[in-house]
Image (tube, rainbow, N blue to C red):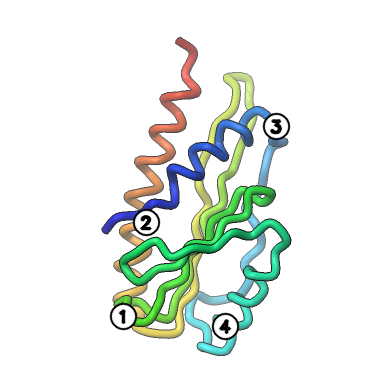
Amino acid sequence: MKHRAFPLVLLLATTAIALAQPSQPPPKRFPTEKITAEQLETYKSEIQAIPDIECREIGAHQRQCTSNAQFTIWIFTLPGHPAHPAVTQAVMLVQRDAQGARVGINRSGYYAGNSAAFDTWMKDFRVVDQKQVAQWESTLQPK
């Protein structure tokens, strides 16, 4: 599965590391991953109303919405995607300690369709997230 979300996040990371205060994972929007289609539509409307949001289709029946101010990317499934309807949210987190800045990704998601397809989709993102964090960490290492 191709995910084009993280080249943009990498660009955001450079800015975030330079500017961000230690960050915390955002509160969960819903108490469980399983939600109704109506709740998912409401959530989508809330995301699209964020002042700096930019949304675009990224292929594979997915739509990516990015907020630079929140260092957050949401990806919504579109009809034809096995996990549709579903959404995943990735938030870049920055922690500072004696060794410098550490970055990570807090990922959450919600679905109103097939739970097995959603689990597979989220597992694919975990692999992408691990690679992205490793890339960020390598760029943060002193030369």
Q: Position of residue 106 (x, y in %)?
A: 53, 52
Residue at horizontal 44%, vertical 46%? Answer: 6
- Return the mark for residue 19: 3
Label 2 or label 3, whichever lies nearer to me, is 3
Q: CA distance from mark 4 to mark 2?
A: 22 Å
Q: Quadrant of residue 135?
A: top left
Q: In this view of the protein, which residue sits in the foreground, 112 or 59?
A: 59
- Return the mark for residue 21: none
Labels 2 and 1 touching (C-beta < 8 A): no
In the image: residue 26, left or right of residue 81? right
- Return the mark for residue 80: 1
In the image: residue 119, left or right of residue 25? left
Q: Residues within 10 Å of mark 2 (few under 14, many from 20)?
A: some
Label 4 or label 2, whichever lies nearer to me, is 4
Q: Going from the N terminus, do you reach mark 3 or mark 4 first?
A: 3
Residue at horizontal 51%, vertical 88%? Answer: 37
Q: Quadrant of the C terminus?
A: top left
Q: Residues within 10 Å of mark 1 (few under 14, many from 20)?
A: few
Labels 1 and 3 touching (C-beta < 8 A): no
- Return the mark for residue 41: 4
**Secondary structure of residue under mark 3:** helix
Q: Going from the N terminus, do you reach mark 1 or mark 4 first?
A: 4
Q: In this view of the protein, which residue sits in the foreground, 137 or 67?
A: 67
Label 1 or label 3, whichever lies nearer to me, is 1
Residue at horizontal 50%, vertical 47%? Answer: 105
Amino acid type assigned to the residue bearing label 1 in the image: Gly
Q: CA distance from mark 3 to mark 4?
A: 33 Å
Q: CA distance from mark 1 to mark 4?
A: 17 Å
Q: Residues within 10 Å of mark 3 (few under 14, many from 20)?
A: few
Q: Position of residue 112 (x, y in %)?
A: 45, 84
